[in-house]
Image: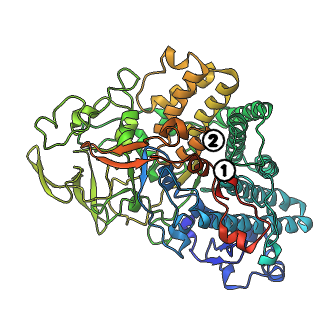
Amino acid sequence: MTMKKMNSKILIVSVLSGLMLFASACVKDLLEQEPTTELAANVFWKTEADATFALQGAYSSIRPLFDRDYYLDGHGEYFRTRGTSATSGNLRLGDAYHNGNYNPSGYAGSFDKMYRYLYGGVNRANYVIENVNKMMATAKPEAIPNLQLILGEARLLRGIVYFRLISMWGDVPYINKVIYDNSEVSGLSRAPIAQVKDSIMADFTYAFDKLPAKASATGRAGKPAALAFRGKLQLYWACWNKFGWPELDTFKPDANAAEVAYNGAAADFNKVINDYGLTLFRGGEPGEIDSLGKAEKLPNYYYLFTPLANNDPEIIMGFTHGGTGTAQGEELMRDVAGRSHEGSQCWVSPRYEIADRYQSTITGDFAPKLVPMNPATAGARTAPNSAVNPASYRNRDYRMKSSIMWDYEVSVGMISLKSTGWCPFIYKTWNQPVNINGVNYTTYNTDGSNSGYVLRKFLRNYAGQGRSDGDYNYPIMRLADVYLMYAEATNAVKGPQADAIALVDKVRRRGNLPPLKADKIASSAAFFSAIEQERIVELYGEGQRGFDIRRWRAMERIWGAPLTEGVWRIDTHGANIDRYFQNVSERVYQQNYIFRIPPGERDRNPNLTQNTPWL
C-alpha cells in the first residue's frame, strides 16, 4: 500500500509535553474511535492487516520528523535557511521544524517543538510495538514471521527517532511503552546516553534480524536500512568517544570504546555495501551535462533528487509522499524555489561559499577561488574567475550544475501547473524581461537568495504539480552516504584503505571527477579531509552537515576561536551579508554543541536535568 492511498488525519494525544501521534494510513479509519487499550484489544488488533495498517500509520506519523532535514543544513556554513514553510498546528507541513533556528550559531535553544514531536514519534512506534507483541502471544505459528517483520520495522522507526534525540540532546528519558496520561512520565529522569544507545542498538539489531533483504513495499524498510542505521549509530558513538562531548557532563569519552565502535560501524557498512547488490543511482555514472545556461540535459545526480529515482536501490530508506490530490505531498519545490515556480518561497538557498567546494573535472582538485564582482563594473561578466562570469563555472564537478544555479542558469518556470518556459536566474534581477542570445525571457523571480545562487537540487524541472504536491521519496539513508561513512570509519582505525579509497572515488565519479590523487590519500588526516569534502558536496542540503560538525567538534576549525572577529558570509557581488561568531563567548560555542532541554518540559517534570551550557 503506498502513501498515495493514505489519508492525512492525525490525532495528537498527550505525551511528555502533550504530543502523541496517531496517523491513519489507509481508507480504514481507526481514528474515528477513542484510542483506549480496551478498544484496541476488542476492536482493532485482530489481524495481520490491522497490524500492517497501524505500522503504515507509524510511518506516516514519523515521516514529518525527518523529511525537511534540509532546513538543518543551515547549521552548517554553506546553506542558508531563512525560515520555514512549516505552519503551526499542521504536522503535514512540518510542524516539528516550526520555530527552529537554522543559523550557524545560537540555534540549539530553539528546538523545543522538535523535542516534543520526536517523543510523539516514539509513542507512535511504541503503540505498534506494544500491540504487535500482544498479538504474537496468541497468534498462529504461520502469522508470527509477518508480525515479527512489522515489529522489526516499528523498532527500526523507534530507533531512528531516539537516535535523533540523543544526537541533539545527549541524555534523554527513555520510554518503551505507550503513554496515555502525562502522570505516567511526569517523574521520568534522563537516561544516560550509553543506556539509550544500547536500547537503540537492540532495536536496530532486531530489525536487521527480522526484516527481509529487500523491503516488502515502496516506502518500507529492509535489512540494509537496519544495518546502515546501526552502523551510523556506532560511527557517531565512536566520534563522541574519540573527540569528546564535554558539554554532556555525564559522558566520559573512552578511546577503546571509540575503536570498537569504529570497527563495528565499518563491519555493518561493509555488509550493506557488499551483501545486497545495491548500486548507486544509474550506476554512479555522471551522465550528460548541458552547456552553460542550458538545462535540457542535466547530470544523473540531479535526477537522483526527483521522482525518477523513487524505488532506486541507492535510496536505502526513504519516506514516500503521495503527490497531487493526496494531502501527502512533499513541499521541496515550495522551499527551494522562488515565486516563478508555482509561487514558491525560497526558504532555503545556497550560500556563496559552497561554489568554491566544487572541484575541477580536469585536475580533480579545487579550482582557483571565485572573485566576487559587481556586475555593473566594466568587464565583470567576462573577467577570469569572476563570480558573475558564467564561464567561471565551466568544467566543475557535475554535482555543481545539479545542485545550484548561478547567473544565467535556467530552470522551467511554472504557474497554475503549466510551464512558462525557461526562466534564467540573474541575481538581484527579479521578474524582469531579458534578452539572451536574441531570445526574450523573464528572469527568475525571487528575493529569497542573498548569495547570488539558488538551489537546483530538489527542484522539479517540469510542470504539472503544485509546489506542495511532490511525490518524491525523500531519502534519510543513501548508499553514497554509507560509502563515505565506511571510508571514515576504516580510516579512523587503519588509515586509508584501498577499498575505502575506491568507494570515495565511486562517489566522485558521479561528479565526473578523476580519482583522488596520491597526496589526498597519503595519511589518515589527508584522507579524512577528502572524505569531508565529498560529504559536503554529495550530501549538500540533506541535513547532514550540522551533525557532522558537532560530532567532529569542528566549529572552532570552521568559525575560528571564541572572542575573535568571526566570519562573514558574502555574495557574488562582493557584499558582506551575514557575520557569524563575532566576539562570541566560549559558552555560546558550548551551547551549539548540545541542545537545550525544553524549559516547559522541566517545569512539568522537576526530575529533568538541564544540559550544563544551558544552566
- Work out whether 238 lies above or below 580: above
Q: Amino acid at mark 1?
A: Ser
Q: Position of residue 423 (x, y in %)?
A: 23, 53
Q: Compare residues 607 and 70 and report the one nearer the observer.
A: 607
In the rendered view, does 288 fall on the left or right side of 433?
right
Instruction: Quadrant for residue 374, please give it.
Output: top left
Residue 167 is labelled as 1
Q: Amino acid at mark 2?
A: Arg
Q: Is residue 136 visible?
A: yes
Q: Position of residue 372 (x, y in %)?
A: 26, 38
Q: Which residue is mark 2?
A: 551
Q: The residue tagged with tag 1: helix, strand or loop? A: helix
Q: Are marks 2 and 1 in contact (CB under 8 Å)?
A: yes
In the rendered view, does 418 fall on the left or right side of 585?
left
Residue located at (49% from left, 32% from top): 533
- Work out whether 459 lies above or below 331: above
Instruction: Quadrant for residue 448, please give it.
Output: bottom left
| Real-space Cα separation, disc 2 to disc 1, in angstroms | 9 Å
